[in-house]
Amino acid sequence: MSKVYLIGAGPGDPGLLTIKAERALKKADVVMYDRLVSAEVLLLANPEAELIYVGKREGEQEATQQVIFDLMLGFARAGKTVARLKGGDACVFGRGGEEWRLLARHGIEVETIPGVSSALAAPALAGVPLTYRGLSRGFAVVTGHSCSAIRWADYARVDTLVILMGVKERAAIAGELIRVGRPASDPAVFIERATTAEERVIETTLGEVAAGRVDVESPAVFVMGAVAGLRAELAAVVREEAAA
């Protein structure tokens, strides 16, 4: 038996990878990585490691997850040091807990190395603080998958709401939140491909999203609340530096 490192790769910028994560990547025999792990992060891995892409496609998530389980068990039993590399933080909507549990049940040592979740990094770097005195006393992070299965009334009055994987159902999510009491005038921001050279930020309102008037591509972080209205001021300096 060997060891599996469950590593959060962060949102994309290799500079946001933790030192501990980089050290684990450099000693891994096998690196199993997801769709949102950037090429720049992979360059930090042991050059002799076997790199295996295990990203999921729509409609094949469960089958791919079973393949991931089997590969991790097989490599660990063969005495390999495995780096299981996931975008953001492995235990924030990354099914890291499920993989950890499976390995633990088979007596395989697991070390979890937290990563910077896009739920935190994307808004902050785009000029949207998740909390702000007088505007937001707290925030919630919710998955946008299976919109109809979520009790949106539980989140309608959260000061700042962050939705991951919500691009596809964005209009339905926004419409449901408005229906249960969140104001249509609520400022909202989408951050596409956060921390990468292709990053794009779309400032809008919840009502515009519900009406289907916001063009955005996945992956993107969807943030709403009064703090989203701060971006025009906070990101102004960043925009000026970029233009100079």
Image: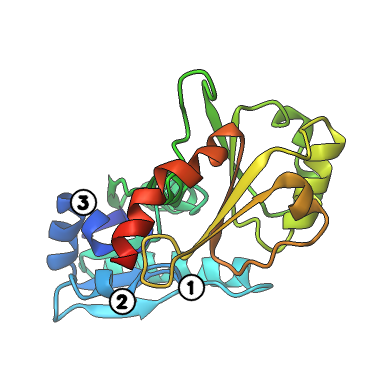
Mark-to-mark CA distance, 2 and 3: 16 Å
Pointer 3 or 1: first along the chain: 3
Camera-side residue of 100 and 235 = 235
x, y percent for residue 195: 36, 61
Q: In the image, what residue type sits under mark 1? A: Gly
Residue that mark 2 sits on = 39
Q: Is residue 88 left or right of residue 223?
A: left
Q: In the image, what residue type sits under mark 2? A: Ala
Q: Which marked residue is nearer to the observer: mark 3 or mark 1?
A: 3
Residue that mark 3 sits on = 18
Residue that mark 1 sits on = 55
Asked if residue 212 shows in the view, the reply is yes
x, y percent for residue 49: 19, 77
Q: Which residue is depicted at the point 29% across and 59% down?
A: 241
Q: Which mark is residue 73?
A: none
Q: Which residue is depicted at the point 47% across and 35% down?
A: 130
Mark-to-mark CA distance, 1 and 2: 14 Å
The quadrant of the rendering that contains the C terminus is: bottom left
Q: Which residue is depicted at the point 20% across and 65% down?
A: 81
Other residues around mark 2 within 10 Å, as few (<14) / some (14–19) / many (≥20): few
Q: In the image, what residue type sits under mark 3? A: Thr
Pointer 1 or 2: first along the chain: 2
Callouts 1 and 2 close, C-beta under 8 Å = no
Camera-side residue of 88 and 159 = 159
Mark-to-mark CA distance, 3 and 1: 22 Å
Residue 71 location, quadrant: bottom left
Other residues around mark 3 within 10 Å, as few (<14) / some (14–19) / many (≥20): some
Disc 1 secondary structure class: loop
